[in-house]
Image (cartoon, rainbow, N blue to C red):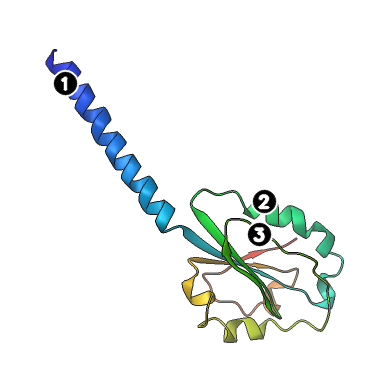
Amino acid sequence: MGPLTRWLILAVAAFGGLAGGYHAYLGKHPHKVLVLIDTSFAMREALPRLPAVLRSLEGRRYTVYALETDKAPIHDFAARLRPGRLDAYAPRNLDALTARAAKPPFDRADQVILISNAAASDLPVPGNWRVVVP
């Protein structure tokens, strides 16, 4: 066995070991995404498009999702987003979201995504949140 063959075997084994270790680490420590849905009166016409928006957010490997509305939690971190039946009711109050930002699951989330059709001036969200318009 020549030196090139030994080097190739060693390189493949090292890469395989590192990739396997990283895969195991990400399996135990997935990326956590909190998805917030604005369910105010103004979102009534956008709610039928919500399943397609949620499907576009899902599907990333090593990622779990928590789902909440601006009024109540729906589910904690899981592999899929399961919104159930959502109704648009009550006036828009996105200020309440920033008040809950220090509590679970906000404090455990690596990323927060807000789904709303509010104008940018009406969104009192921190700079690290991502806003998706349905």
Question: Which corner quadrant of the image does residue 119 belong to?
Answer: bottom right
Q: Residues within 10 Å of mark 1 (few under 14, many from 20)?
A: few
Decide which of 16, 106 is in the foreground and name it: 16
Q: Which mark is residue 130?
A: none
Q: Is residue 120 above or below residue 11?
A: below
Amino acid type, label 2: Ser
- Between 75 and 108, the one nearer to me in the picture: 75
**Looking at the figure, which quarter contains the N terminus?**
top left
Residue 71 versus residue 133 in the image, above or below: below
Q: Which residue is mark 1?
A: 6
Mark 3 touches mark 2? (CB < 8 Å):
no
- What residue is shown with label 3? 81
Residue 123, image x and y in percent?
Answer: 66, 77
Quarter holding the C terminus is: bottom right
The residue under the point 16% across, 21% down is 6
Quick check: marks 1 and 3 in contact, CB under 8 Å?
Answer: no
Residue for badge 2: 56
